[in-house]
Amino acid sequence: MNDNAAYMPLLARINSLVKLSDEEQQAILSLPIQEKKYGVREDIVHEGDRPTKSFYIREGVVCVNKTTRAGRRQIAAIHIAGDIPDLQSLHLEVMDISITTFTPCTLEYMRHEDIRTLCRSHPRVADVLWRETLVDAAIYREWLTNAGQRDAYTRVAHFICEMIARHRTVGLAEEDENGISISWPITQIELGDALGMSNVHINRSLQALRERGLIDLKKRTLIVPSISRLEEAGEFDATYLHLRST
Amino acid sequence: MNDNAAYMPLLARINSLVKLSDEEQQAILSLPIQEKKYGVREDIVHEGDRPTKSFYIREGVVCVNKTTRAGRRQIAAIHIAGDIPDLQSLHLEVMDISITTFTPCTLEYMRHEDIRTLCRSHPRVADVLWRETLVDAAIYREWLTNAGQRDAYTRVAHFICEMIARHRTVGLAEEDENGISISWPITQIELGDALGMSNVHINRSLQALRERGLIDLKKRTLIVPSISRLEEAGEFDATYLHLRST
DNA sequence: CGCACTCTTGACCGAGATCAACATTCGTGG
DNA sequence: CCACGAATGTTGATCTCGGTCAAGAGTGCG
């Protein structure tokens, strides 16, 4: 019934964290899903919604964002293929965030009911999903630290390091003799909204990183020649991503 | 064996969110716990630790914090009686945060093993605990928005509103004709570390709030004469706390 | 091919940081 | 219970990082 390939990014992500038994993997594969496609900069869920299903990203990039009463937007998270950005709605009725696409996306929807049934019959799967939301929380904490304590230059570098690390774990980073590269659909305005900075200052910080040869960003592609040097600049320590031993 | 009163704040917190059956409540009451007391400004858990138990706060106030490589501290969360600050360690092996007391604390430790067993036998209890961690995550997002998008004055007001709201839901706020009051063990330096501001500017923002009659803060007690006016000043909307209908 | 979005650069400004000194409160031991 | 030292709070002066404004240059999409 379901196209198994549709579950690929999800299983890849989960397997990068824990080893599930064949039976557990089968249970996930038999979750009914429904595919839906979105274009660029479309709202998937909106603050105040009460979803009865969650989705994971088969392809594309989305952001979690919320808007201040004064009209300022904070991007609180960025999610890539394999992520389940609104898993929280499984237990929190009302959305306190919106989710918006950065790129065209293919999403696979799973009904909360079905997820709950799966969690009941396979507690280890429940644990993995729970864990997933805990890692999201750890990332929020790190972003908070980034916004609250690091200067612009370091902050931008840190953000880029995280993006690289996360793309790597799901196999979306390319590595060759020039360094590591990922696709970079994020505009400077959006980066500003994520880091609590103006787009002008984002621009200047990116240039500083370029000048020092830490990044090469053009045509929606980011190349990092030396990840260790960038991590140095961004005070980056991947512990908070809680990846299993590489 | 266990003193039932020890479970009070935890049950109060949980019951403020969901209705559990008697049997489920009993199951929680029969969780083996171990009490431990801490003094002021003591580390409970530290970055890099690998705890095999979690605790909930029977009494006192603690903060979740992490320190930048440059030596700057971000306070990422503040937890009060009833909260389970390091529940994340149930699924994330290595702590990416430290937890430190603000006041003398009485903590009740529960072994991860026992929590896991409880979750397996009572899935609804598992859901409640999961939910709890999701609310923590929602608070992180809001703090990020606060730090990234709101100016100092609004930011401080927002923070105070949250503290009031959370103290109210667990019955730790007093309300009389002068307004709502809570105990306030947080120094201005700590407040600065939580909001990403210098203590000097915290001081000035607090004074601005005082001048406008929005708060009355002295002797470690905070009084808010009109919570609605303060919420106006802080752009506060409690949705993100995901409290059940009041 | 033209319009809209994104990026870049320069000039200026201001919120909030930093520094420093002093006042007040609190906790501790005598 | 008091005294004294340390932590916390307050105030003023100065400085700076990053915001805002504005205009021009690329880039890409319809």
Image: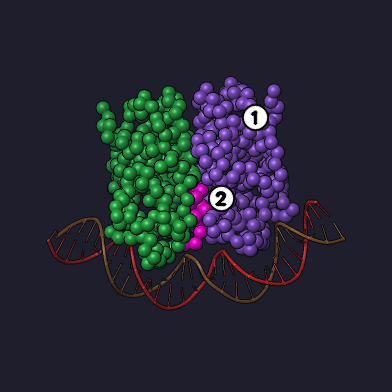
Chain colours: A purple, B green, C brown, D red
* Image point (36%, 33%), residue name: B110
What is the crowding at mark 2: few (fewer than 14 residues within 10 Å), some, or many (at least 20)? many
Query: Residue B145 in magenta?
Result: yes
Q: How many marks?
A: 2
Quadrant, the C terminus of chain B: top left
Relative image position of residue B146 (x, y in whole percent): 49, 55
Q: Amino acid at mark 2?
A: Lys
Q: Measured along the vertical axis of the image, is residue A198 above or below residue B75?
A: below
For disc 2, the chain is A
For disc 1, the chain is A
Secondary structure at numbered mark 1: loop
Same-chain status of marks 1 and 2: yes
Disc 1 to disc 2, C-alpha distance: 27 Å
Residue range corresponding to the magenta coloring: B139-152
Q: Measured along the vertical axis of the image, is residue B161 above or below residue A128?
A: below
* Image point (44%, 28%), residue name: B124
Between B179 and B28, which is closer to the camera in this rendering? B179
Residue A81 visible here? yes
* Image point (46%, 39%), residue name: B133
Secondary structure at numbered mark 2: strand
Residue A33 shows which numbered tag? 1
Q: Main secondary structure of the magenta part?
A: helix
* Image point (48%, 46%), residue name: B239
Relative image position of residue D25 (x, y in whole percent): 77, 66
> What residue did someone put label 2 on?
A66
